[in-house]
Amino acid sequence: MVLKPDAALVEDDTKRFRKAVEEHYASGNLRVVIDLADVPFIDSEGLEVLLDLAEHAHVGGGGLRIACICDISRDILVATRIGSRIQVYADVSEARKSLM
């Protein structure tokens, strides 16, 4: 499953994003790619949500991957070392392949 948020992952928007991913998890789909091509920024709340969702998928035997992240958000993942805990891919197709 590929989900493509269309706004920054900041405090107000993370609730809607979390709910969308959790709905896929509840349906038994624990393999999710998050396409961040249209996400210009991720704040601390967004990072926390990504970590929580990745952990949930991992514990359930699935996985969460990030694809198409912008440079600013990639720098944030590197600086916070979150990039070492969530796999990041340049494009959606490679992220999807990693979940097979």
Image: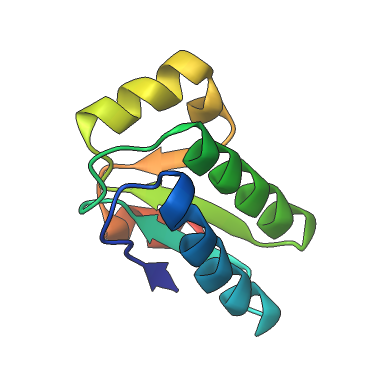
Task: Tell me how many marks there are.
Answer: 0
* Vertical arrangement, residue 9 with respect to residue 4, above or below: above
**Residue at 50% across, 31% down:** 44
* Vertical arrangement, residue 58 with respect to residue 74, above or below: below
Which residue lies most toward the bottom here?
27
Query: Does residue 47 appear to the left or right of 75 in the view shown?
Result: right
| Residue 17 horizontal/vertical position (percent) | 47, 62
| Residue 35 horizontal/vertical position (percent) | 32, 57
Colour pattern: rainbow
**Residue at 62% across, 49% down:** 54
**Residue at 41% across, 48% down:** 66
| Residue 59 horizontal/vertical position (percent) | 78, 55
Which residue lies most toward the top here?
79
Name the quarter where the N terminus is drawn: bottom left
**Residue at 23% across, 41% down:** 40
| Residue 15 horizontal/vertical position (percent) | 53, 60
Viewer can see residue 100: no
* Vertical arrangement, residue 50 with respect to residue 7, above or below: above
Residue 29: name its quadrant.
Answer: bottom right
Which residue lies most toward the right here?
59
Q: Nearer the viewer, residue 93 or 7?
A: 7
Viewer can see residue 64: yes
